[in-house]
Image (cartoon, helix red, strand yellow):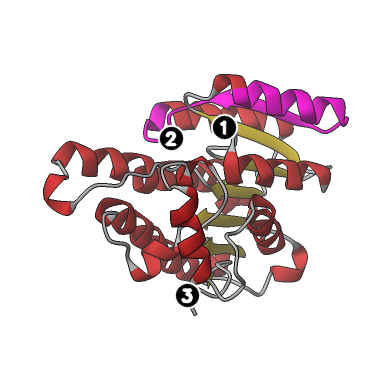
Amino acid sequence: MNKTVIITGAAKGIGREIAIKFAKSGYNVCINYNTSEKKAKELKSVLDLLGLSSIIYQADVSNREQVDNMIDTVLNTFHSIDVVVNNAGICEYKLFNDLTEADLQRMINTSIMGTFNVTQSALKKYMIHNKCGSIVNISSIWGMVGSSMEVNYSTSKAAIIGMSKALAKELGPSNITVNVVAPGAIDTDMNANFSESEMREFCDEIPLGRIGKVEDIAGVVKFLACDEARYITGQVISPNGGIVM
């Protein structure tokens, strides 16, 4: 029986590439999205044309009822949940003094509560009982070192690292690994606000001289879910071109 992966925020960017990577490796893939229905359907069509197994599921990961329904649908369809990739997130650039409670709460709901809801639901409904599985949470270098004008984003990504490390200790006896991938600057829509000159200046600070590609992240995520990585847990792996060491 093929293994099954749930990827949140999988309709575009890093999540999309992760979905393609797992599908090409023979996984059943649940493509979760919230608002990007068109892009989710386009990805499903790409995988269908390749003869690969996938479903799309609309769920706001901050809503526990919607998450539980998604987990139930995956189990009814594929009968297992072997990997959870918590990728859903939002980004916001604001001076700290301009941030509102609503801004921070929106960030917490998506990044922290979303990761909490999907992980706990998958654990309760399948992983703990079966004593197997891998959880890969997507953080950021800004969760490791912080970023000016991204205090709420950096806060949420740092929280994911702390949650993952604690959970890795708790789930180790159940043979479930929990790891973090903390990307550096990656060529996605999140960087659309930066000008070409700003991106060139940033690249000059990166030892490898370029921003990352979505493929650079998807490969690391896939590795952390494979059998060769079963002795890796509680770790933060940061594909960032060397800008953070």
Q: Is residue 155 left or right of residue 33?
A: left
Q: Nearer the viewer, mark 3 or mark 1?
A: 3
Q: Nearer the viewer, residue 174 or 145?
A: 145
Residue drawn at the location 47% of the way across and 54% of the way down:
197
Q: Quadrant of the N terminus?
A: top right
Q: Position of residue 73 (x, y in %)?
A: 61, 26
Mark 1: few, some, or many residues within 10 Å (few <14, many ≥20)?
many
Mark 2–mark 3 distance (CA, rounded to whole Å) = 30 Å
Tag on residue 61?
A: 2
Q: Marks 2 and 1: in contact by CB < 8 Å? A: yes
Secondary structure beneath label 1: strand
Residue drawn at the location 39% of the way across and 33% of the way down:
64
Q: Nearer the viewer, residue 176 or 236?
A: 236
| Res. 138 visible in picture | yes
**Magenta extent:** 39-65
> Which residue is the site of mark 1?
32
Q: Marks 1 and 3: in contact by CB < 8 Å? A: no
Mark 3–mark 1 distance (CA, rounded to whole Å) = 30 Å
N-term-proximal mark, 3 vs 1 = 1
Tag on residue 244?
A: 3
| Res. 182 visible in picture | no
